[in-house]
Amino acid sequence: MNKYWSLLTKKLSPYEPGEQPQDRKYLKLNTNENPFPPSEEVLSKIRGSVSDSLRLYPDPNSTKLKSAIANYYDLDINNIFVGNGSDEILAFSFLAFFKDKNPISFPNVTYSFYPVYCNLFEIGFNTFPLDCNFSIDIEKIDTNSGGIIFPNPNAPTGVYFGLSGIEEILNKFPDIMLIVDEAYIDFGGASCIELIEKYNNLLVIQTFSKSRSLAGMRVGFAIGHPNLIMALNRVKNSFNSYPLDTIAIEGAIGAIEDNDYFVTCCSQIVEARKYLSNELEKMSFHVLPSKANFLFVNHPKLDAASIYRKLKESGILVRHFNNPIIDNFLRITIGKKEEMILLVKSIKSITGVDHV
Ligand SMILES: *Cc1c(COP(=O)(O)O)cnc(C)c1O
C-alpha cells in the first residue's frame, strides 16, 4: 500500500466492469451493450454539435435534454435529473438519500456497484435473500432499513418485479427512499415512473447506455418528486457543474426524439431473446425468465466457467461472475438474431450438447 494513500483509499474495493479487450475482435455479449448503432438522426445531431461552439462550456443544467425527456414522459422538467451515465446518478443518489441513516438494503444477487458505493461513501448495508426463483420477497427486507435499492429487471438475473410489488414496498416503507434502477426497463417491463406522482419517496433511474445504443456517450437520467431532484442537484453542484458535455446532450436529445428507431431496435432484441431462450432450453439449459437484454442461464451438467473460457477462445465474450451464489451461471447479452445463431452453433460445438 502506498504511504500517500488515505485510509479510505486503502479500504476501497472498486467495481470491475466487464472486459473490453483490445487484443482481437470479439462478438461482445458480456456488457449488455446494444447490438444496433445509434440512428442516423442521432449521429447527425452529434456531428452537428462538433463545431466552434465547443470552446464554450455546456449548459450546466442540460435544460434542452431535460425538456426532451420531460416531454417524452409527459412530466415537468422539475421531475428530471440528468447525469454522466446512470452510474454517476446512482453515486449522487447514495450521497443524497442513503448517507447518515440506518443500513440500506438491496438483494443478495444484484448490481455489484451498490456495495462499492456504500464502501466509498461509508454507508452501511444489508442484503435480503431472493427466493428460489430469484424474485424479491418483501418479507425478507429489513424492517429497519434506511433505504432500499434494486434494479428492475434485476441484474444480472433479468428477473422483472411487477408494479404491484413495488407499490407494496412503497406502502410498507413510506418513510425511507426506494430507488428503482431501470437500466433494462425498455426490453419488456413496465416502468414505475407512473408511481412518482403518488409516492414522493420513489426515485427512478434510467440510462441511454442499453436500450438507446449510447453506452459510449455516458448519459443517464433520474425521475422523481421535485424535492428529490433538488437534492440531486445540490450533490451534483457540489461535485461537477458540467457532468454532461455539449456532444452528449445533443446525442441524447436525438435518441429521445427518434422514437421509431428505438422501438424497432428494442423489439428486435426481444425477438432475438425469445429465439436464444428457446434454443438454450432445447439444449437443457435452465433459462431464467428475462425482461432485459440479456439471459441468465445455467446447465445441470456443464460448468459455466469452462463454457465461458471456451467461448472466449472461439471469439465470443459472455459474462461469468465469481459470486458463489451464481458462479454456475452465465449472463449472455442479446445481440442481433444472426449473432444469436452464431452463439448457439458455438455452444453446441464447444459442449457437444445438441438438441434433445
Ligand atoms: C448498465 C447498468 C447501469 C449503468 O449504466 P450507465 O448509464 O452506463 O452508467 C446501471 N445499473 C445497472 C443495473 C446496469 O446494468
Image (cartoon, helix red, strand yellow):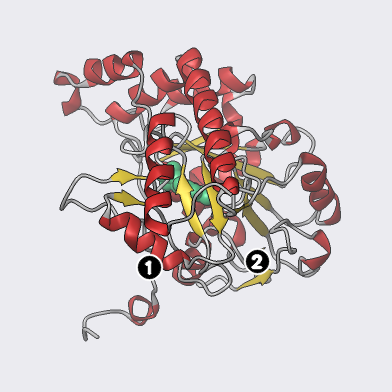
Question: What residue is shown with label 1?
Answer: 14
CA distance for labels 1 and 2: 19 Å
> Which residue lies under the disc numbered 2?
104
Left or right of 240: which side holds 65? Answer: right
Which residue corresponds to the image point at 23% horizontal and 15% vertical from the top-left? 48
Q: Which image quarter holds the N terminus?
A: bottom left
Mark 1 against mark 2, which lies toward the viewer? 1
Query: Residue 293 vs residue 166: left or right?
Result: left
Residue 153 appears in the figure: yes
Specify whether residue 213 is in view. Answer: no
First in residue order: circle 1 vs circle 2: 1
Provide the secondary structure element on which disc 2 rests: strand
Residue 155 higher or lower than 120, as above or below: above
Rendered residue at 34%/13% (across/down): 41
Tell me: residue 179, above or below residue 106: above
Where is residue 271, by image quadrant?
A: top right
Q: Foreground: 192 or 82?
A: 192
Which element carries disc 1, helix, strand or loop? loop
Left or right relative to 121: residue 138: right
Foreground residue, 337 or 323? Answer: 337
Quarter of the image holding residue 229? top right
- From the top left corner, tell me how far across and down residue 158 is, in percent: 59, 48
Q: Residue 300: where, in percent of width, then height?
A: 59, 65
Q: Amino acid at mark 2?
A: Ile
User: Residue at 53% of width from left, 38% of height from top?
Assistant: 206
